Image: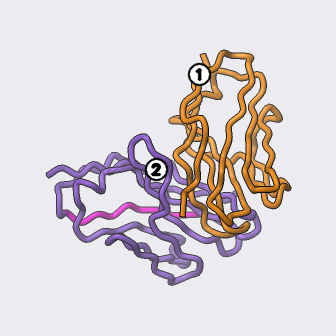
Chain colours: A orange, B purple
C-alpha cells in the first residue's frame, strides 16, 4: 500500500506571500492531520480533518488554514508568510480519528 | 495541559550497546503512547505504541512499557546498530483530543561502529 505523499517536497517563498501544501493519505484513511516541525518549537499540531470536517485545531494563528476533499486528500494554506513560518510541514493520515498516525516525508518551506 | 518530557540528547553509543531513552508524560485520562523515529531528511515513522497501562509495545528489537504508576514510557533496545542512528520522539494522544499527537522534544541517537 502506498504511503502518505506530500507535494511539493521543497518550497521557497518570500515574506508576505501565501502558500498551499498538498497531502494524499494512505488509501482508505479518512483522517488527515498536519504538524509543523521547527528546531525551536519542535513538533506542533496544526489541525485534523476527518470526512471533510475540521475535528481539532492547534494553537496557531488564523493565517494557517486547511481543508479536506471528498477523496480524503488535504491541503493546508498559509497566508501572509512570515520568516518564522519556515519549517518542515508534516502530514499524517489515520484510518479514523483516534488511531495511530502515519506520516509523510514532509514539505520543507523556507520563507525569505 | 498534556505534555511529554524526554531526555535531552544527543545520546552517543557504540554498536551493540544497550539503549534507554527516558520518556515521562502528563495527561488527564488515559492517553495512548507512541515512539516515532525520524531519519535524516525524512518524515516520522511509527516505531511502537501502547494504548493502556502495562501494555508493552515492541518492534525491530525496541521495546517500551506503558507505566501508569510512574507516568513513563521508556524506550529500550538491547543491542543498537549503526543503522539505529536517528532522532526518536515520544508522543501521546489524549483520547478526548481526537488524533492530535503531543510530542516530546526528541532525542538524537548516534551509534558508532
Residue B4 occupies which quadrant of the picture? bottom right
Q: Chain of mark 2?
A: B
Q: Is residue A42 magenta?
A: no
- Structural distance between the alpha carbons of marks 2 and 1: 26 Å
Residue drawn 30% across and 56% down?
B84
Residue drawn 75% across and 35% down?
A77
Q: Chain of mark 1?
A: A
The residue singled out by tag 1 in the image is A12
Q: Residues within 10 Å of mark 2 (few under 14, many from 20)?
A: many
The residue singled out by tag 2 in the image is B106
Residue drawn 19% across and 63% down?
B17
Please state, as top left, top right, bottom left or bottom right, where the N terminus of chain A lies in the image.
Answer: bottom right
Q: Main secondary structure of the magenta part?
A: strand
Residue positioned most to the left? B113
Relative image position of residue B56 (x, y in whole percent) = 46, 80
Q: Is residue B23 magenta?
A: yes
Relative height, residue A18 to residue A66 (above, below): above
Relative height, residue A34 to residue B26 (above, below): above
Residue drawn 76% across and 56% down?
A71
Residue range in magenta is B17-25
Residue positioned most to the bottom? B54
Amino acid at each position: 500500500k502506498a504511503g502518505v505523499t506530500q507535494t511539493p517536497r521543497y518550497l521557497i517563498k518570500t515574506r508576505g506571500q501565501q502558500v498551499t501544501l498538498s497531502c494524499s493519505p494512505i488509501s482508505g484513511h479518512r483522517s488527515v492531520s498536519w504538524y509543523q516541525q521547527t528546531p525551536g518549537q519542535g513538533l506542533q499540531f496544526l489541525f485534523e480533518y476527518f470526512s471533510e470536517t475540521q475535528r481539532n485545531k492547534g494553537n496557531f494563528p488564523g493565517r494557517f488554514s486547511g481543508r479536506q476533499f471528498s477523496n480524503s486528500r488535504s491541503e493546508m494554506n498559509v497566508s501572509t508568510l512570515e520568516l518564522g513560518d519556515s519549517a518542515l510541514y508534516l502530514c499524517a493520515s489515520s484510518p479514523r480519528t483516534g488511531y495511530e498516525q502515519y506520516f509523510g516525508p514532509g514539505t520543507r518551506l523556507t520563507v525569505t | 495541559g498534556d505534555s511529554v518530557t524526554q531526555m535531552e540528547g544527543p545520546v552517543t553509543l557504540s554498536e551493540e550497546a544497550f539503549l534507554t531513552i527516558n520518556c515521562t508524560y502528563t495527561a488527564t485520562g488515559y492517553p495512548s503512547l507512541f515512539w516515532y523515529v525520524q531519519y535524516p531528511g525524512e518524515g516520522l515513522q511509527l516505531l511502537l505504541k501502547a494504548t493502556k497501562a502495562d501494555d508493552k509495545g515492541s518492534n525491530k528489537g525496541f521495546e517500551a512499557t506503558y507505566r501508569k504508576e510512574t507516568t513513563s514510557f521508556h524506550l529500550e533496545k538491547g543491542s543498537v546498530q549503526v543503522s539505529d542512528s536517528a532522532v526518536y520522539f515520544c508522543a501521546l494522544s489524549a483520547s478526548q483530543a481526537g488524533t492530535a499527537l503531543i510530542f516530546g522534544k526528541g532525542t538524537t541517537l548516534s551509534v558508532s561502529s
